[in-house]
Structure formats: C-alpha cells, structure tokens
Amino acid sequence: MKISPIKSLENFKGLVIIPFIEIEESDQAISFESFSISKNLFSGKKDSQFIIEDKDSERIFLLVGLGKEPTYKSNKTAFRRLTSKQEHLFEKKAMIWLDDTMDSDFLEAAVSGLMLGTYRLGHYKHTEKGPKNWSKVNISVLSDIKEPKKIIEKGLKIAAAQIETFNLVDLPPNKVTPKYLADWAIDTGKKYGFEVKVLDKKKAEKENLKAFLAVGQGSSREPQFIIMKYRSKAAKNHVGLVGKGVTFDTGGLNIKTQGMVHMKCDMGGAATVLGAMQLIADLGLNVNITAVVPCVENAIDSHSFLPSDIIGSYSGKTIEIIDTDAEGRLILADGLSYLIQNFKPDTIIDFATLTGSAVGTFGYECAALFSKNEGLLNNLQKSGESIGERLWPLPMWDEYKTEMDSEIADIKNYHGKPIAGAITAAKFLEFFTENHASWAHIDIAGTAFGDSEFAKTKHATAYGVHLLIKLLENL
C-alpha cells in the first residue's frame, strides 16, 4: 500500500473516503460537493457508514461516521475496519478527503489504521484466490494539514512495526522459537540500524544467567538471551527495556490446567520490545536504548526445574521455586540485573504477560502499571491515554514484600496465595532492580492479545509499541 498527499480532487476517479464527526441534532443534513444527505440516513454516528456512487464522475463516496467525540484509537479502528472488512472497495486507487478540523494526529491514526487493516491472521490457510496484493493499491490524502507526507510516513512506520509485532505473537510456537526471535532481532537490527548480540546457552552459562537458564532447561529448544543497542548522537536520555520472551508456557511441572492453547502469546512482552526497537530505529528517535529480551520455552521433561528447587541468578541472589508456572519473573530477574549492572540506563521499563491477576483486576482494556517513580508513572499514563493504550498503577507498598520472603533462600518466586498476584510479582522483580530510581513494570497479560472484531480467535494487539514511542518522544 502506498499513501501520499494530493492537492486536489479534480480528475480523481475511484473510491473517496470522507470521515465525518457526528452532526448536532439541530443540523439538517450533511453536505459535500453537490450531495446533501438527510441526517435520518447518515449523521456521522460512531461506526456508521453511507455509500454513494456517482457514475458521472466515476467516484464512489464512502462516508465514515466517527461519533461526537472521536479519539485517536477510535479513529484508527474506523479506518482499520475499512481495509479489513471492505477490501473489495479498494481497487487500484482510493482517496481520503479530510476537512480542516482533522489534525495531524487524525491523519496519523487514519494512515496507521488503513495499514493495520491489511493484516490477516490466516498465515497457513490455503485459498484459491490468495491474499490481496495491497502493494498495488495507491491511496491519496486531500488535506490542509502542514507536512502531510511526513505524518503519513510516520503513520506507516508505526503500523509496520505493529504488524511485525502481530506476526511474532500470532505465529505458532513451533515457528516462533527462542532462536526465531534471536534471528529476527539480528535481521531487523541490520535492516534498521541497531546493534544486536545474542547469548546462546553456553554463553549464558558463562555469564551466570542462572535463573534464565533454569526456566529453559526442560526444553530441547535452546534459550537465547538477546541484547540490543540503539544509539543517537543527539540523545539526552538512556532508556533500558526488558521483554518477557517465553515462546510457549506449559507451566512446567506445575502444568497449566486450562488456557494452554493461548500460551504461544506468552512472549508478548518480548514482541513489544522487539517491535519497539524496529520503530525507534525507523523513526530515528533522539534517545539511547538498550534492550534485553530473554527468550526461553517452559517445557516439561526429565530435566525440567522442580518446585522446591533453589536456583541462582545473575544478581547472585538465590530463589526458592514454589511454582514452575511463575517462570516469567525468573527470566525477567536476570534480564533486569544484566541490564542494570552492565549498561546503567537512566530509566528502565519492562513489559511482560506476567499474571492472570492483572487480567482479573483490569480485564482486557488496561495494563497493570507498577513504579515508585511518580514522574514516570504520570508520563506513561499520559502517553498511553493519548493513543488508547491505557494503563493504571497498582500499589508498590513494602508490606507486600514480606509475601515473597523465603526461609531457605533470598526470595521465593511465588507466595502461593490467590491474592495480590500481580503486585507480589512486581515486588519480586523489584528485588532485582538494585533499588533503581526510575523503573516501571507493565503487566500486559490482559492487553497483549485478545478478542476483537478483526478475527474470530484471540490475536495480537501490539500493545506497548506505540506507547513506548509516545513516551520517548516526550522525555
């Protein structure tokens, strides 16, 4: 798909998309060109559409209702819906006609939405027709916005990174293994311009990444510890990222009793960080980034780590294993320690599909946010709210710390109680942050994948990719 600005509607033939904000009740009709449409037929209500074919000009006008108070997210969804569900309308040419009330954020959301709508979940389906070749579709944008080309390019780059994130999460676990993610990082680093180093099992053993290795020891698929560095000469801040990369989670010997079919998505945090690295480099942001993505498969065999095991960690601290299904926090512990000790970033943010407790608290509309840094909390919430990727803080009071006390080791990996699961997991991670002054943990178990109108089964959302960019742009 190619999207570019145009200065006039003159001589254009084909699909013309016109978005409308809902009109007031006092208004009698919607008017454009020579057309006047009664509000009884179309008033711009959210999720509504109206189609007019003008044979004289050889144009099809598609009116898209945005509602009274459209948001970045609702606008993006409205345009994604077009290419996702009405691809037959998009032949070789189409055009978006924006009025003077629609700003650069609107254009960015519209462009991203159109691009995201071209994604299909049927990676392995065989069909006679085959998927639509969107590269042959040219879309023009008629708008008075300044520098529309720049905004269009940014919108397309955001969508491209999010689609890569979709792929990583949606593809099956026999495809997306730890090695697959490591190779993806290496190839993407070469393409977009960031440095990648991968520690395989032997190198991880030399580095004493003991907690990371313990989780992966039951799988025949070798763990991979990915380290990525993006540097800008104009950078004033150094941000560290960590993403949980459990490519499939059986629960280990504490085997899951339900929902295992969705555990290919347990590397959603890794996908967020990987997708964000592509986008950061693609946009050329003025920030230094060091990202660590520990990738393992939590499988079951005679070598699997056991409940009641005492394992080591990169930090040197010992961990009592209460539950092998509380494995994500173990690889994150080594990821955080490695990042802090070796790179000393100013701010650290980790993303992880960590607990069912976060889903129980917020459902699928909001991620759980943990930090003792009020400035970072506020910046993350503000950034997320502006694009519809919501997150909300839960307490980090030290009273919860005692829940993770172990009598035999420095800490245990699970408190064994059906309460405060997301909070105690965050307190476990905090134990390995060396009391870093600017660290945030984001539990995306409910937001990384889920049901939507764009597929019949749970699928990736790319939550966090754009959120990170909004945050970094405002640092």
Image: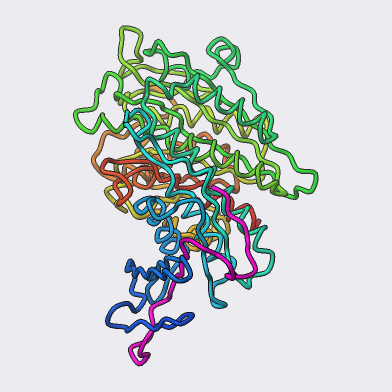
Residue 423 place in picture, x, y as percent: 37, 45
Give me the residue at 27% from left, 33% from top: 416
Give me the residue at 38% from left, 31% from top: 123
- 122 on left or right of 79: left
Q: Is residue 403 visible?
A: yes
Membership of 328 in magenta stretch: no
The magenta-colored residue range is: 1-29
Q: Residue furthest left?
A: 257
Give the camera-side residue of 136 and 350: 136
Residue 92 place in picture, x, y as percent: 50, 51
Q: Residue furthest bottom?
A: 26
In the picture shown, does residue 17 fall above or below 209? below
Colour scheme in use? rainbow
Membership of 5 in magenta stretch: yes
Looking at the rendered structure, the number of numbered marks drawn on it comes to: 0
Q: Is residue 322 visible?
A: no
Give the camera-side residue of 197 and 398: 197
In the picture shown, does residue 93 fall above or below 414? below
Q: Residue furthest right?
A: 233
Q: Kindly indicate the quadrant of the structure image that contains residue 233.
A: top right
Quadrant housing the C terminus = bottom right
Residue 250 place in picture, x, y as percent: 29, 23
Give me the residue at 54% from left, 39% from top: 275
Q: Residue furthest top?
A: 302
Q: Kindly indicate the quadrant of the structure image that contains residue 227.
A: top right
Residue 369 place in picture, x, y as percent: 44, 51
In the picture shown, does residue 178 fall above or below 134? above
